[in-house]
Image: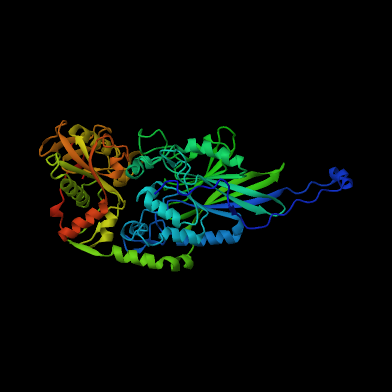
């Protein structure tokens, strides 16, 4: 399917409600002579409210498909677009629908069994296939524009294009460009005109920016087809164009955090979380809806380096837990509209009930997925849990590595690499996943592997594996021998997330957390003997890690021997279904432990 199938509009065809009044007739000369003595007329003003969500990740209802129950957490949050719809309705009623704009900053069609089902099980791309539930919900709520997130590309461009076709709003991505023509493959911007009685209309431009990391994380789908320049560069290109087209207000919807950091190391010359950089470097932006980082920012004020003007940023919590609100005040002076002030806040979706319109519209789709994830595929001999998996070698993670090893060994059988030893990496994604003793369902296994990652085989040396493990061990906070050990403070050093800590199977090793990062891996053995740095191994990794996600050393540049498009989650379900019985004796082993100066921590 051509990447530039949908052409973006040079001028907006979208017009806000209201009627534009003609200018007053010219005053007679006699009245003009008296004008200097009359009181000045009050300045024309206009109030605009921009609402925003981000990182919805397929959450329509306040439902946990992995637990088969209403979603709850300790903070009392609620999730889902059905709640957001109620908040949006309230804001529109208060402000006037014709004075509001509703945006999203990306990551909409991946993240729950609901979105997986309509991408893979009953795909929207099939002839006569269904309309994606997220398209249905967002159409019904009345979104004006949505920026592309990196997870929009997880199911391939065909699925994304079909979703785009089903949406009654544009998917924006100024920095998602055709690899050959370098022209935008998606609409870069959207302009909406708001009519103001007795004054010229207010033109609001929305620039959509996505994450350059897509080039790494979804290389299999986008390589040779799309490229993703930096946000700062593309904003500097497009914002002046929008102003020259008469935009009175410029809002950026950016699937990019505000921290200025990156998780892909030096593999790309672009910053992953660049929203604040855009605000500082590019003049004439009034507000930025921030996404990608999954943090709550009610209001962040950034001063533009060139103009000294304040740019307001806001990021609502992911999964439809919050709605950002930008209140923008404009004044008409010297023949043009000017932004006088911008402020932002977030509204909590736990304060309202589901919108019955959304519930009625999508309950049938939801019920189909609930039935699907509750299918029984096997029986577990004992309960397996991830509660301690980030600091103790847990059998439940060994299940993942065992499945990956078996799949890769089967794939390489009969090839020149069939005799090369296979190892596998896996991360403790969840701290609450549990496979209970007794019946094992698809939702139990899905909760263990919450991402739609696929499997890749890479050729590595012993020395590279050693460096890989040392990098992984940086996840732990250095803790002196004899110091109290608090497990909640032992991990996530320097903010590293759990999904960037890896087990590696097929070895035995200690991680000495009393030592400085870089010299923690001790007693590294393969088959009971010291690991040979020159020996070759096949490392089974997920596609995120294989493409450089987490910036682990050597793996991205290592020779790729094999890859597939079937999700690791599906492979786990197939393995358990084939076994029938999930018994730790078939996959569990104690490969690593935490120590301090040689003494086990636990």
237 to 48, vertically: above or below:
above
Q: How many marks overall?
A: 0
Q: Position of residue 286 (x, y in %)?
A: 57, 43
The answer to whether residue 390 is seen in the rendering is: no
Q: What residue lies at 44% left-to-right and 53% top-to-bottom?
A: 164
The residue sitting at the top extreme is 534
Lateral position of residue 236 relative to residue 490, left or right: right
Lateral position of residue 280 relative to residue 522, left or right: right
The residue sitting at the right extreme is 30
Lateral position of residue 205 relative to residue 411, left or right: right
433 to 547, vertically: above or below:
below
Q: What residue lies at 34% left-to-right and 66% top-to-bottom?
A: 368
The answer to whether residue 316 is seen in the rendering is: yes
To which quarter of the image does residue 115 belong?
A: bottom left
Residue placed most toward the observer, 488 or 96 = 96
Residue placed most toward the observer, 214 or 224 = 224
367 to 213, vertically: above or below:
below
Residue placed most toward the observer, 429 or 288 = 288
To which quarter of the image does residue 425 belong?
A: top left
Q: Position of residue 487 (x, y in %)?
A: 29, 46
Q: Position of residue 374 (x, y in %)?
A: 28, 65
State which quarter of the image contains the C terminus: top left
Q: Position of residue 84 (x, y in %)?
A: 48, 59
């Amino acid at each position: 399917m051509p990447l530039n199938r949908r052409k973006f509009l040079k001028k907006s065809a979208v017009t806000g409600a209201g009627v534009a009044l003609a200018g007053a007739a010219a005053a007679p000369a006699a009245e003009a002579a008296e004008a200097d003595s009359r009181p000045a007329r009050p300045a024309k003003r206009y109030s605009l409210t921009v609402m925003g969500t981000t990182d919805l990740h397929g959450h329509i209802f306040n439902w946990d498909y992995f637990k088969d129950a209403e979603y709850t957490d300790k903070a009392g949050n609620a999730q889902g677009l059905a709640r957001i719809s109620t908040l949006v309705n309230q804001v529109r009623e208060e402000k006037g629908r014709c004075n509001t704009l509703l945006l999203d900053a990306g990551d909409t069609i991946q993240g729950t069994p609901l979105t997986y089902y309509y991408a893979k099980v009953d795909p929207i791309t099939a002839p006569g296939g269904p309309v994606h539930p997220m398209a249905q919900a967002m159409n019904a709520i009345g979104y004006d524009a949505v920026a592309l997130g990196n997870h929009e590309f997880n199911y391939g461009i065909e699925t994304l294009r079909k979703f785009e076709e089903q949406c009654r709003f544009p998917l924006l991505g100024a920095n998602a460009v055709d690899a050959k023509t370098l022209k935008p493959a998606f609409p870069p911007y959207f302009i909406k005109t708001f009519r103001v009685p007795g004054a010229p209309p207010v033109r609001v431009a929305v620039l959509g920016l996505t994450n350059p990391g897509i080039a790494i994380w979804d290389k299999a789908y986008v390589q040779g087809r799309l490229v993703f320049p930096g946000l700062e560069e593309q904003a500097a290109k497009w914002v002046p164009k929008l102003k020259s087209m008469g935009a009175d207000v410029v809002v950026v919807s950016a699937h990019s955090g505000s921290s200025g950091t990156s998780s892909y190391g030096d593999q790309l010359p672009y910053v992953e979380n660049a929203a604040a950089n855009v605000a500082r470097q590019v003049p004439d932006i009034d507000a930025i809806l921030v996404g990608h980082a999954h943090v709550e920012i009610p209001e962040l004020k950034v001063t533009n380096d060139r103009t000294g003007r304040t740019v307001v940023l806001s990021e609502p919590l992911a999964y439809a837990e919050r709605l950002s609100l930008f209140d923008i005040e404009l004044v008409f002076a010297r023949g043009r509209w000017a932004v006088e002030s911008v402020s932002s806040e977030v509204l909590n979706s736990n304060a309202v009930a589901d919108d019955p319109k959304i519930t009625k519209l999508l309950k049938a789709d939801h019920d189909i997925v609930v039935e699907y994830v509750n299918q029984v595929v096997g029986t577990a001999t004992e309960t397996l849990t991830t509660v301690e998996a980030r600091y103790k070698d847990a059998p439940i993670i060994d299940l993942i590595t065992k499945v990956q090893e078996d799949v890769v060994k089967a794939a390489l059988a009969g090839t020149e690499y069939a005799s090369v030893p296979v190892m596998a990496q896996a991360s403790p994604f969840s701290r609450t996943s549990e496979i209970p003793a007794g019946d094992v369902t698809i939702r139990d296994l899905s909760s263990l592997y919450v991402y739609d990652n696929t499997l890749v085989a890479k050729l590595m040396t012993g020395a590279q594996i050693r460096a890989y493990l040392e990098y992984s061990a940086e996840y732990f906070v250095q803790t002196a021998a004899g110091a109290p050990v608090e497990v909640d403070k032992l991990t996530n050093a320097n903010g590293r997330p759990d999904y960037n800590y890896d087990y590696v199977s097929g070895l035995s090793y200690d991680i000495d957390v009393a030592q400085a990062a870089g010299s923690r891996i001790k007693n590294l053995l393969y088959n009971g003997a010291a690991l040979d740095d020159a020996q070759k191994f096949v490392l089974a990794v997920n596609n995120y890690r294989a493409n450089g996600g987490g910036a682990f050393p050597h793996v991205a540049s290592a020779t790729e021997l094999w890859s597939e498009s079937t999700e690791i989650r599906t492979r786990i379900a197939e393995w358990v279904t084939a076994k029938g019985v999930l018994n730790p004796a078939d996959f569990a082993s104690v490969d690593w432990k935490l120590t301090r100066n040689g003494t086990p921590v636990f």
